[in-house]
Structures are given as structure tokens and as C-alpha cells.
Image (cartoon, rainbow, N blue to C red):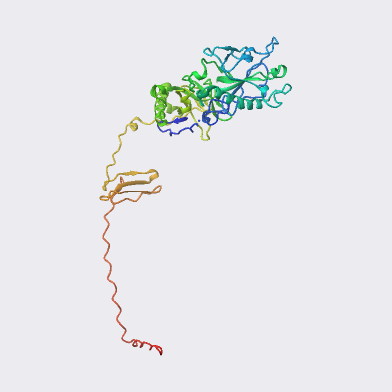
Amino acid sequence: MWHESERDERPTRRHPRVAWLNSLQGTLQASATRRALLLTALGGLLIAGLVTALPIGGGPGRLAGYIDPVPPTGSKGNDAFDRAATGNCLMWPDRMPEAANIVDCKDEHRFEVAESIDMRTFPGSEYGPSAPPPSATRIEQISQEQCESAVRRYLGAKFDPNSKFIISMLWSGDKAWRQFGERRMLCGVQLPGAGNEQIAFKGKVADVDQSKVWPDGTCLGIDPSTNQPTDIPVDCAAPHAMEVTGTVNLLARFPEGLPPEPEQDAFIKDSCTKLTDAYLMPVQLRSTTLTLIYSTLSVPSWSAGSRQVACSIGATLGNGGWATLLNSAKGPLKINGQPPVPPPDIPQERLNLPPIPLGPTPGGGAASTGSNGSSSSSGSSGSSGSSSSSSGSSGSSSQRQGDQHLPGQQPAPPAQAPAPEAPPPAPEAPNPFAPPPAAPEPPPPGQ
């Protein structure tokens, strides 16, 4: 889960948990708030002879690769690609995947194989001997259908839904498909880097800490089409969404296990605040107008062995997107092309003002002033011990209970006793000139 933390005047706001985001869609990353597509033009990528990054699914850095199995000598294919099996690790020189070799996973490698899949075993004629190569869209669908489940099976309990590693695919490309009937593809995991390159790492994914952390000062890219972070390291002089300011290790504070989220959140927020202040010094975070951002660890991530979270700074937009940053926050920072406008400094004497005691009201209760000119008060009556409160609308005061009053108001004058009631009017005297009253009518006969 991702959070944004503000100090001073900056409003505190919690990023959707992550939330900063949440289906897997072909990657070990699940937090959509912090996710974005690593989109590339697919049309020119289905070319033999290249290993090129392609998106898998709808998230960032969802990569598929292509290994050309037809080297210039004309032999059938890349031997390492043909022999690779579950648990093997592949390494190749920069931008030379055709020279891939199977290496010991304890050494540096760029790809860990979860499963080798032979598409000739699929039903139907789509992968038959005379079938045309699949389109880029179809390759993406195959990757989602096959590689997501393959990696989940491969990692088992060590599958971290918020891992820094991503699910990826290697296949042989159009030329091998057409000329040699190559129908194999490799599902596995890799560590994405800048420029659609794979970062070399040591050890099997299940045996390493998969926490999504980077060295201090790393800037993470932004997808211009969605204004979402990509989690791909880029040069800080290039457009980016966030700048990493530190790493918090929860194991040092919670060796007994994952703590409740409020306790975890408080520890990470305090640690990230201190780390960010130290990283930016002498620049103050408030002068950059950026927001402190951090995540918490979920139970699945902790169970998979992840123990660290990254602290970073960035700026979100009102529409859910992220501002585009240029340069480090320690240098000539620009936010959406403009330098930040720091908020006015708070005078030191205002920061150290002592609290103003209001004191008890004559009725023994406390009084407070509300917002927008409205005010509210609460107190207790002398003998009953019951309490009451009232609130007024904007620009008005609430009615006072008993003899309470708000600060600055004059006590209400004592209520005057009501005037005595006038005596009832005397009955009117009979009119001497009025005729005598009529005699009552006799009863009807027979009664």
C-alpha cells in the first residue's frame, strides 16, 4: 500500500491502498496506483534478430522478449534457448540476447526460467506447421494466458504480488517460426531497467528479498500517456514521477513478524521523514512542494520474504495522475515544466507560541470556537451530570447552555421575573331593562 505524507501546511493524504493498483495482469506487481504501462510500438518489434521489450497485460514493465534462434552461421537456433528448462538462468551481454548462455543462478543473470512451453501442443491449427506467426496482440494474450500461471506455479508461496521482478516471456521470433517451425517460448521473471533493458541480478527470485527498493537518488520514470509511475529507473534529468530518498527495513524493528498496519505505518512514516530530511539537506522538503510517499508491506509480500519499503518524493495531480518532474529535488527541480513555488516561511516565533489557556466558563464547562465564525460549546449542569452541546451555522454562534459563555462574550444579563398576571374581569351585572326569562315549555302529553 502506498501513502502520501505531508508535514506543515501540506495536507495529509493517503494514496489509494494502492492500492498507488489491482490485478496482476502478467506481472508480479499489483499496486495500480504506482503502476503504468511501459508502452512501446509493437509493429516494428516482431523482427527476428532482436530481443525487444514488449508490454504484457495492462501494467508497467510487462515485458516479453525475442531471441533470434538463427545466428549468422545458419545453424538451427540458439542452443541455450533450446535447452533452457524450469529453474535455469540465462545471461547475455548488453543488447546481445542472441549470445545468451545458461549460467549458475548464483551468478549474474538477466532471466530466470519458470517454464518452457511448446505451443505445438496447443489445440487447433493456430500453431500448426503452416500457421503464420502470431501478431503482437496475440503474443500478449499468450503471455497472459501462459506465463502468469506458470510463474505463480513456479514461485508458489514465494510469489510476491508487489515484487520488483516482473513476469516476462522470451520467444524465438518470426524467422524461426517460419523457417524452422520453432514453437517454444520461455516464461520467467526478470528485473526491468531503463531503455527496455534487463538488469542483471544474482540468486534465484525465491531466495532473495523481492522488495521494491532502489538506491537513494534513483528516479523512477513516468508514462506520459497515463501520468502514472513506471517503476523503471531513469536519469533524473529525464521526465520522471518520483525520486527515491531512502529505504526502511522493517525486520530491524519488527523481528517477530509483520506488525499491525497502524504500527507499521507509523514506523515507516517516521523513518521516511527522517531519511528524506537527511537526503535533501540543506534543502527542505516543504520548499520543493513535493510529497513524501511510502508503502507498507502486505501479508503476501511479507510471507514471500520481502522486508523493505522505499521512501520517495513526488507530486500527484487532482485527476489521479502524477506530475512530471525534471532534475533532482536537490537541484534545479521543475514540476510540469515550472520551478516549484515554495510556501511562505513560518516565522520561528509563531512556531514556538505557547498555548493560550481559555480557562473554565462560569458554568464549569469548556468553550471552543468553531470554524467559519461558528462556535460550539459543551458543559455539564450542576447536579444532574448530563452534558449537552449545540452548534451554529457559518457566521453564527451556538446557543449557550445554562450560564456558559464563549471567550470574548459578555455574560448574559440575569433574566427578569415575569410580570404578575392581571386579575380576571368581573362578571357583567344583569340589565335591569331586559325582559324576564321565558318560562320553560311544558312536557308533551303522556309523559
Above or below for 445 versus 201: below
Residue 350 position by quadrant: top left
Q: Nearer the viewer, residue 16 or 273?
A: 16
Give the percent coordinates (x, y) of residue 232: 54, 22
Q: At x 56% / y 12%, what residue is drawn?
A: 103
User: Is residue 152 left or right of 129 when viewed as pictured?
Assistant: left
The outermost residue toward the top is 73
Mark yes or no: residue 146 visible: yes
Q: Which of 244 and 372 is in front in this view?
A: 244
User: Is residue 406 left or right of 236 when viewed as pictured?
Assistant: left
Above or below for 52 versus 365: above
User: Is residue 229 left or right of 379 when viewed as pictured?
Assistant: right
Q: How many labels does the image show?
A: 0
Q: At x 30% / y 79%, what residue is drawn?
A: 428
User: Is residue 428 left or right of 273 when viewed as pictured?
Assistant: left
Mark yes or no: residue 298 visible: no
Give the quadrant of the C terminus: bottom left
Residue 370 position by quadrant: top left
Q: Nearer the viewer, residue 26 or 242?
A: 26
The outermost residue toward the bottom is 445
Give the percent coordinates (x, y) of residue 38: 58, 25
Give the percent coordinates (x, y) of residue 376: 35, 46
Give the percent coordinates (x, y) of residue 228: 54, 29
